[in-house]
Structures are given as C-alpha cells and as structure tokens.
C-alpha cells in the first residue's frame, strides 16, 4: 500500500436541501480519475487499513467499470451516494444548432419556442450581453449579485469569489452571460470554457419576480442558439435532476460520487442521518410542488 497518501481535512456537512444544518470536521482521502492509478490495485485489506487512519474516502468522477469500485462495494463498506450525482447532464452541439433543435422532443421544442416568444413580447427591449474580459468582471459580478439577491437562491452564492472569476478571465477560460429586460438584469449564467470548447456551468439564476416569463430558460436557449460565437461545442450542466436539464440536455455521462466509511462508525451514523434528511426534503418538495406552494415557501425562507 502506498505510504505517501495525501490526507485532507474536510468539512462533512449535514444538509436539508440548500440549508446547511451542521459542519463536522473530518479527514479523508480524495480519490478521482487523476489519481485512481495509485489506489485501484488496493486489496480489501489495504482499503480496511486506509479506513482505520481516516474518517472516510471521498470518491468523485470514477468510471463505473473500474475494479476499485467493485472492491469497495464487495467489501460491504457503508457509503453515502447521492442519487442525483449519478448522472451528469450536458448539451452536445457537435452537429450544430439546427440538428440540435431538430432532435429535441416535440413537446419541449414547442414549449421552448412559445416561452421565448412570450418573453420578447413582454418587454420593450431585450438584450443578451456576454462577458469574457477581465475588465468586464466587475460589471458582471454586480449585475449577477443583483439578480441573485432577487432569486430563490438568495444566500447561496457566498462560495464565489471575485478573485476566482478574475483568474479565469485572465486565462481566457471564463464566459458570463446576462439577459437584460427593459435595461434591468433579469437572468445570468456563467462558467468556464476549456480547451475542448466545453462550457462548464458554474452558476445560474434569475429574478424570481419574472419567473412566469421563464427568463432562465430563455437565456439558456439564446446561448445555445449563439454557440458558434464562442465556438462552444458542448455545455456541461453538472449533476442533478432539475427539469430544465431534462428539457435542454441531449446527452449524459455516468459518474460515481460517494463517501465510504467503516460500518458502525460515527460517520456511518451521520451518513444515515443525511439519507433521512434527503428523503424528508424530497417529500416536502414534491408535496409543495403538487400544492403549488413551492415559491411561497421560498419567499418565507428568504425573509427569515
């Protein structure tokens, strides 16, 4: 077993949806596709010894056919896997916009065209502005924050630093887009552009007051339509099962995402608590959507 292991301090968070209930200090070994060769020859005994020294293994983006995954599951360890993290949705634009629209499900195509037309008819002026230069970061961040403060996501953007966006812009790896209606910022999206012309989404949001006009979907639709302007070949929306991803995305990748620990350990118990919280949140979310109370509940949470 490799003795030069890279142990990391990590904060395990108990969450109820977007809400962070507790932060618990922990130690882990992060395993991903870049370092899997250091670990895939581990025996079950090696894995057991590793889990004695740390709280858990943090496995991300490991291909499902690797023997290492089979060994972990065969050893009957306790692991917390978030089912929404099993699918990575993205838009493949290799064949161009016309082919992409042509292949879209008929009901989604009609719905999208209707919503885009309705949005443009609702406002006197509509403008889509792209940001990719370092001297444009401050304006983008200010307008993005304005939108975010009026969105149901309010309070969840604290992980994004101006320095991070500046660094990406300096490397020519950043692209932001804001949709303005009657001169006011109403929807935003931004992410990284890599060398494979893949646009990886970092964050997006819209003004909740305009939700009936679907500004988020309109913005994404226009970015797809104008994809050749920045030579975008694909858009990676990351994991999750949001409805808009299923409408827009025409391709998926299977990924493996899990936390692995020993049976009967403190973290095995915490993983079980998180599973209960996830199930409870899903039940509340489904019920509120059926009763059409979801936006009212979000408004109450923002006020508190």
Image: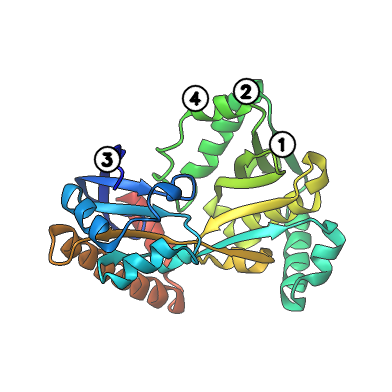
Q: Earlier in the sequence, mark 3 or mark 4?
A: 3
Query: Disc 2 designates what residue?
Result: 170
Tally of numbered discs: 4
Q: Residue at x 80, y 63 (%)?
A: 100
Q: Residue at x 13, y 61 (%)?
A: 265
Q: Residue at x 59, y 55 (%)?
A: 237
Q: Residues within 10 Å of mark 1 (few under 14, many from 20)?
A: some
Query: Disc 1 designates what residue?
Result: 130
- Say if 84 sits above or below 230 in the image: below
Report x, y in % for residue 11: 26, 44
Q: Residue at x 59, y 61 (%)?
A: 89
Q: Earlier in the sequence, mark 1 or mark 2?
A: 1
- Say if 60 sits above or below 9 in the image: below
Q: Earlier in the sequence, mark 4 or mark 1?
A: 1
Q: 111 or 171, which lies in front?
A: 171
Tell me how far mark 2 sits from mark 4, CA to CA. 10 Å
Report x, y in % for residue 51: 21, 54
Tell me the mark number nearer the camera, choosing from 2 and 3.
3
Tell me how far mark 2 sits from mark 3, CA to CA. 38 Å
Q: Earlier in the sequence, mark 1 or mark 3?
A: 3
Tell me the mark number nearer the camera, choosing from 2 and 4.
2
Q: Is residue 53 visible?
A: yes
Q: Secondary structure at mark 4?
A: helix
Query: Disc 3 designates what residue?
Result: 3
Residue 163's disc is 4
Q: Earlier in the sequence, mark 2 or mark 3?
A: 3
């Amino acid at each position: 077993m490799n003795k030069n292991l890279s142990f990391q301090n990590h904060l395990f968070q108990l969450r109820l949806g977007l809400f962070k209930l507790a932060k618990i200090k922990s130690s882990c070994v992060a395993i991903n596709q870049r370092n899997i060769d250091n670990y895939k020859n581990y025996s079950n005994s090696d894995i057991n010894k590793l889990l004695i020294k740390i709280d858990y293994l943090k496995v991300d983006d490991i291909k499902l056919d690797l023997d290492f995954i089979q060994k972990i599951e065969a050893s009957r360890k306790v692991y917390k896997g978030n089912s929404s993290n099993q699918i990575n949705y993205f838009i493949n634009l290799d064949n161009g916009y016309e082919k992409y629209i042509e292949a879209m499900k008929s009901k989604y195509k009609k719905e999208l065209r209707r919503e885009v037309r309705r949005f443009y008819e609702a406002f006197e002026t509509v403008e889509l502005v792209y940001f990719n230069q370092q001297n444009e970061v401050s304006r983008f961040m200010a307008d993005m924050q304005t939108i975010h403060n009026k969105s149901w996501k309010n309070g969840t953007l604290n992980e994004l630093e101006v320095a991070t966006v500046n660094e990406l812009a300096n490397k020519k790896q950043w692209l932001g887009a804001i949709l303005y209606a009657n001169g006011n910022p109403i929807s935003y999206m931004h992410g990284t552009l890599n060398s494979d012309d893949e646009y990886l989404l970092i964050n997006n949001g819209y003004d909740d007051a305009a939700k009936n006009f679907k500004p988020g979907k309109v913005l994404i639709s226009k970015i797809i339509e104008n994809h050749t302007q920045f030579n975008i070949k694909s858009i990676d929306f990351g994991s999750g099962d949001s409805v808009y991803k299923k409408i827009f995305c025409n391709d998926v990748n299977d990924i493996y995402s899990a936390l692995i620990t020993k049976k009967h350990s403190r973290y095995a118990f915490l993983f079980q608590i998180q599973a209960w919280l996830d199930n409870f949140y899903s039940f509340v979310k489904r019920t509120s959507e059926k009763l059409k109370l979801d936006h009212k509940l979000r408004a109450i949470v923002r006020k508190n």
